[in-house]
Image (cartoon, rainbow, N blue to C red):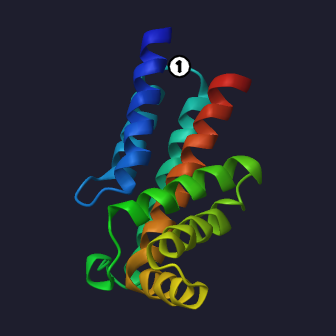
Amino acid sequence: MGAWDLLLAGLVLLLGLCGVLLPGVPGSWLVWAGVLWWALKDPRPVAWWVCVGATAVLLLSQVVRWALPPRRLAASGSDARMLAYAGCGSFLGFVLLPVIGAVPGFLGGAYVCERLRLGRRAEAVAATRTAMRSGGWSVLTELFTCQLITAAWLAAVFWW
């Protein structure tokens, strides 16, 4: 597989990761499509194992998301800025404390945004709790799944 194909597959994965945080963009399916495209172009068996694993993890994620409340973040007073803070926190947490840091990073990012918006600690905690109950867990589940798939793709590209 050429460098340009890898770069384009990586850009599709990055677009999918950002798309998870945007309403109406099928971010997880863009991540899966990027992995599938890479697997179709790369003849190594590891590419197909990553693709099969990504498919299984995405299907499991969809089952978990169906069990969670639907996304109604706008009704809770959350906006795109809160999702941006939570997403950045999740990415930082995923990198600084590999894999498990994504969850506290997401919650921390949402809390920081609410603290800056509301000013008081108690109000920020209540607003963060409301946002997570209104669909934040669904967003976190999808984002965490896409981060896992992207990390597996990066590991397969750079180490195998």
Q: Which x, y percent locates residue 55?
A: 47, 51
Instruction: Locate residue 55 relative to residue 78 in the image: left or right.
Output: right
Frontmost residue, 124 versus 13: 124
* Rendered residue at 42%/43% (across/down): 31
Please, which residue is most extreme toward the left here? 24
Label 1: few (<14), some or many (≥20) within 10 Å?
few
Counting every numbered tag in the picture gives 1
Tell me the residue that label 1 is attached to.
43
Observer able to see residue 52: yes
Observer able to see residue 160: no
Task: Classify residue 66 by image quadrant.
Answer: bottom left
Instruction: Locate residue 123 relative to residue 22 in the image: left or right.
Output: right
* Rendered residue at 61%/28% (across/down): 45
Frontmost residue, 89 versus 19: 89
Q: Is residue 18 above or below residue 112?
A: above
Q: Which x, y percent locates residue 71?
A: 32, 76
* Rendered residue at 44%/37% (across/down): 14
Q: Which image quarter is the C terminus in? A: top right
Q: Callout 1: helix, strand or loop?
A: loop
Please, which residue is most extreme toward the front here? 119
Q: Which x, y percent locates residue 18?
A: 40, 47
Q: Is residue 155 above or below residue 81?
A: above
Q: Which x, y percent locates residue 120?
A: 55, 84
* Rendered residue at 32%/68% (across/down): 79
Q: Is residue 109 above or below residue 35?
A: below
Frontmost residue, 152 versus 95: 95
Task: Identify residue type, mark 1.
Answer: Pro
Task: Classify residue 73 by image quadrant.
Answer: bottom left
Frontmost residue, 108 versus 27: 108
